[in-house]
Amino acid sequence: MLSVPSQRSVVVSAFRYALGRSTYVVSDTATALKEAAELLPRSQRQQIIDEIEMAIESDRAGMAMDIAVWRELQEFFRDLEFKESNDEPDVMPF
């Protein structure tokens, strides 16, 4: 089994390969990223959100069906971020 750092590396590499492709691999990659989401640090998930946005804005995110998958992944990561930020315990000042 791959170590957590190796798993992160593999899914992020797959993402960067798939972004802009017009094949089934887009959907498979998005699914893998969702499954590995909690292994990725928040900063890395935000980087993926940003890279998707840049690819869409520059018309390098694939066909319309691919863009829909990427948008769904962005929303998934944003929802996870919202959930995690609301799950953090409040710290009471002394």
Image (spheres, grey):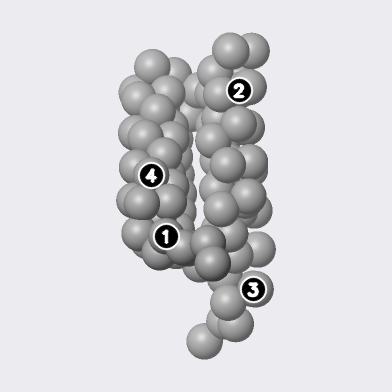
The amino acid type, in three-letter code, at marker 1 is Asp
- Name the image quarter holding the C terminus: bottom right
Residue at disc 2, secondary structure: helix
Name the residue carrying label 4.
Answer: 82
Do the residues under discs 4 and 3 have CB atoms within 8 angstroms? no
Residue at disc 3, secondary structure: helix
Name the residue carrying label 3.
Answer: 6
Residue at disc 1, secondary structure: loop
Taking the spot 58% from the left edge, 77% from the top edge, the residue there is: 4
Q: Quadrant of residue 26?
A: top left
Image-based side of 63 in relation to 18, left or right: left
The residue mark sitting in front, 4 or 3, is 4
Name the residue carrying label 2.
Answer: 55
Give the image location of residue 11, x and y in percent: 55, 58
Name the residue carrying label 1.
Answer: 90
Image-based side of 81 in relation to 94, left or right: left
Q: Earlier in the sequence, mark 4 or mark 3?
A: 3
